[in-house]
Amino acid sequence: MRVAAFTSLGGPDGVTIQQWDDPDPGPKEAVVDVEACSINRHDLWILEGESSMVGEDVLPFVTGLDLAGRVRSVGDGVAGVEPGDRVVLCPNETCGECTYCREGPETLCEEFGLYHGGLAERALVDADRLLKLPEALSSSVAAAIPTAYMTAWRMLRRAEVQPGDLVFVPGATGGVGVAAIQLAGVLNAETIATSRSAEKLERVGDVGADHLIQSDAPESLADDVRKIGRPDAVINHLGGPFTRAGLDAIDRGGRMVICGRTAGPVSEFNVGRLFLEHQRIIGSTMGTQGDLRRLVDLAAEGAYEPVVGGTYDLEGTADAFADMQTRDAFGKLVVEP
């Protein structure tokens, strides 16, 4: 089978198409013919050599968390899926035995990790992480859901977003940002989206943002946001200086949920305002398999339409990462092996 392997770390030039042996499923495993695999900032960090999870010692390395396709074969002890089923993978990896795995949420498992291997013609996966796809969803649309939409959905729920709430999403034109805008709409909340790009801002308006601010300057964002209103919640996938911007903008008792560090790993903010105004900062990573099931069902029902910003064949995987790196993309980028 063909794979898009990372053969060096540093950037898109490190992606090489290689021939690998086809995988065989072991007990409770399945092999999936991959029809689509979306890429994430997580994958790009690995490729750029910025991830502590993957180093030069494990190259060549095949990433790709969010895959959809058709079951090719299954190993012993597999129940729930069979060859021929159309499926999407929940990329969570957990121990399956701890309190959090038994009672939830599984994202708190001390051994929590993520699947890698979707940027290939075939993928070997844990069969119990596969969800059957409704006919209403194509593989490319389904592959856009897991990481971005699971993350955004869990953040909105942890921020306790209710109908009528005002939700601020800085940098709302990437995968998680677009997902947060759309899913806040599913919850009947009002949204404020920001971007430095007028074109992308128009597109995020088209997918449901109620208020648009063209800016990427964190020092002035709070003032711009407060001209619209005092948000009840901030969905922050940027980190860095945008944490202070969000806290300066939100209302008394407001909640900020953070899932990323694209704008920087360190944030400085006014501690006095944090406790005097009873604000909360909440960390969040991914979502649960139950969240993914709910999101697949909502998409199939037409409650929202996952945004695919571009599709590439396997040979175009390096181009997909280059487009992500230059921030030219809007929505999810999907490789179709």
Image (cartoon, helix red, strand yellow):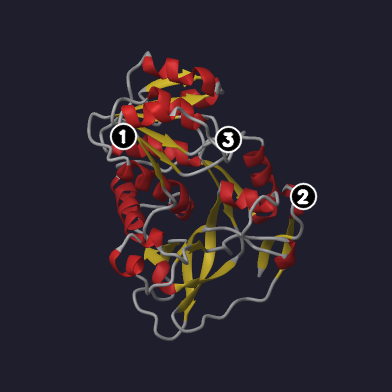
Q: Examine the image and state in which quarter residue 6 appears.
A: bottom right
Amino acid type of the residue tagged 2 in the rendering: Asp
Sequence order check, earlier mark of 1 and 3: 1
Kindly identify which numbered label has been placed on residue 185: 1
- State the CA–CA distance, disc 3 to disc 2: 24 Å
For the residues bearing labels 2 and 1, Cβ distance under 8 angstroms? no
Label 3: how many Cα within 10 Å (few below 14, some 14–19, many 20+): some
Label 2: how many Cα within 10 Å (few below 14, some 14–19, many 20+): some
Q: Is residue 272 visible?
A: yes
Residue at (40%, 19%) from the top-left corner?
Answer: 225
Percent from the top left, x then y, of residue 96? Answer: 39, 72
Q: Which image quarter is the N terminus in?
A: bottom right
- State the CA–CA distance, disc 1 to disc 3: 25 Å
Percent from the top left, x then y, of residue 7? Answer: 75, 60
Give the vertical position of 302 relative to 2 (above or below).
above
For the residues bearing labels 1 and 3, Cβ distance under 8 angstroms? no
Which residue is the site of mark 3?
263
Amino acid type of the residue tagged 1 in the rendering: Gly
Front disc: 3 or 2: 3
Sequence order check, earlier mark of 3 and 2: 2
